[in-house]
Image (cartoon, rainbow, N blue to C red):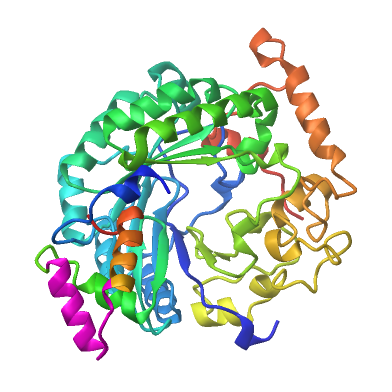
Amino acid sequence: MSQAAIKPPFWLLAELTYRCPLHCVFCYNPVNYTETSNELNTEDWIRVFEQARELGAAQLGFSGGEPLLRDDLDTLVAHARKLGFYTNLITSGVGLNEKRIASLKQAGLDHIQLSFQDSTKEINDFLSSTKTFDLKKKVAGLIKQYDYPMVLNVVLHRQNIDHIDKIIDMGLELGAEYIELANTQYYGWALKNRDHLLPTHDQIIQAEAIVNRYREVIGKQCKLLFVTPDYFEQRPKACMNGWGSVFLDIAPDGAALPCHNARELPGLDIPNVKEFSIHDIWYDSKAFNFFRGFDWMQEPCRSCSEKEKDFGGCRCQAYLLTGDAAAADPVCSKSPKHNVITQAIHQAHAAKPQDGRIEHPIVFRTDKNSRDLTQPID
Amino acid sequence: MNEQSQTPLPERPQLNRRFRLQWEESQQANVLLYPEGMVQLNASAAEILKRCDGEHTIDELISEIEAVFNETNLRDPIEGMLRAAFDKDWIL
């Protein structure tokens, strides 16, 4: 792809830290996150923001891990806001007390996305392996009190998808302007726990019907976003809207990633912001050009009439499930490896974890599990 | 069309606080920014939304826009744009 054809990044995701007070079973952070130390310092982040803004990035997400664990969050928000970014805080809510939220308001933070794991205390606290449900409700109150637009984000899976009506009710009651009902994407910790999390097709059809019923009733009060799990689709998602097209993710250690999970892909030579400018990373790096455009594609993608719509799907999913990062995303029914998806669905439903006779117990995202699961790299 | 389109336009439209209107140098355009998204505006849409400040009436807004673009008879396209903006929640 020629440099002139490359559009500037639009969305900068600053994963400030992998540290997190929660231990969610569906976390997309890398399973080996404990191997990543040396978080970028304040100056590094500010440099990244300046360079990305200069290229044209307009949206900035502060994420993690839990971004509130960074003591310099207010400073970073203030700088980003001054540069003209629309600033989004993506948080579990843990650590967001009144003093902190007032200071973030002062810094110019535009919006807060608060995650819940479920509408019930039991499931919320079980899935995150914490006692955080009541605290999250308190935080939702603070977000409204400080007049922030609030996006409530709930990751859906087999254990909570049947409560979707209660989850929406909770969001409406808390005054959310958007409710994001995002089915789990199977990367990182979620992939480890797939047999416990993958819902049935019937559950999804039912959930979507409930969402549509609510949409008719609630009108403008709140927007409901329902993200279907791609395992049940016939075509893959347009992952990242195309590789190196709009999305730039900076990991806690400064690794610049074309998507959250790109670190898992072989041969990319992931660049680091400590060594390269955002301009060079975006336009010239091997990693960001690896799957740009259409030249890298194999059949059936190469000659597919839909390739400009879905870009062949997700590279990480192709790699994790077929072993070849340039293969068609196996979610696509045209993929010769589509059977890995149908098998995964079959296997998840055969596992019946509710019987307590599961082969692999559920794995919480903890430092110990991360170290135990980390394979030594040759 | 849905029911919302039948609601009369506000007398003095005001940009929804959930949206931020700003000039983007790299796009040479005004944009509306909102949680995790962006809409690029053409020149006339930007001029209209800039005047959605809760003070201009629609009539005042129309005469100012006609002066800016040195044209007359812009009522229909402007009201159409305001209607679309209202339905999308950009203005209240």
Looking at the image, residue A121 lies above or below residue A7: above
Q: Residue A158 is drawn in which quadrant?
A: top right
Across and down, in percent, residue A17 comes to 43, 52
- Nearest to the observer: residue B54 or residue B17: B54
Secondary structure mostly seen in magenta is helix
Across and down, in percent, residue A117 comes to 45, 29
- Nearest to the observer: residue A291 or residue B27: B27
Left or right of A320, for residue A83: left
Left or right of A306, for residue B92: left
Across and down, in percent, residue A97 comes to 20, 39
Within the magenta stretch, is there residue B59?
yes
Q: Which residue lies furthest to the top in this view?
A: A355
Q: Residue furthest bottom?
A: B70
Q: Residue A60 is drawn in which quadrant?
A: bottom left
Q: Is residue A84 visible?
A: no
The N terminus of chain A - image quarter = bottom right
Across and down, in percent, residue A241 comes to 60, 62
Q: Which residue is rendered at x = 57% and y = 77% of the image?
A: A281
Q: Which residue is rendered at x = 51% and y = 26% of the image?
A: A210
Q: Residue A39 is drawn in which quadrant?
A: bottom left
Within the magenta stretch, is there residue A315?
no
Q: Residue furthest left?
A: B55
Looking at the image, residue A9 lies above or below residue A362: below
The C terminus of chain A - image quarter = bottom right
Left or right of A112, for residue A299: right
Looking at the image, residue A2 lies above or below residue A297: below
Q: Which residue is rendered at x = 20% and y = 61% of the image?
A: A107
Q: What stretch is highlighted in magenta?
A: B57-75
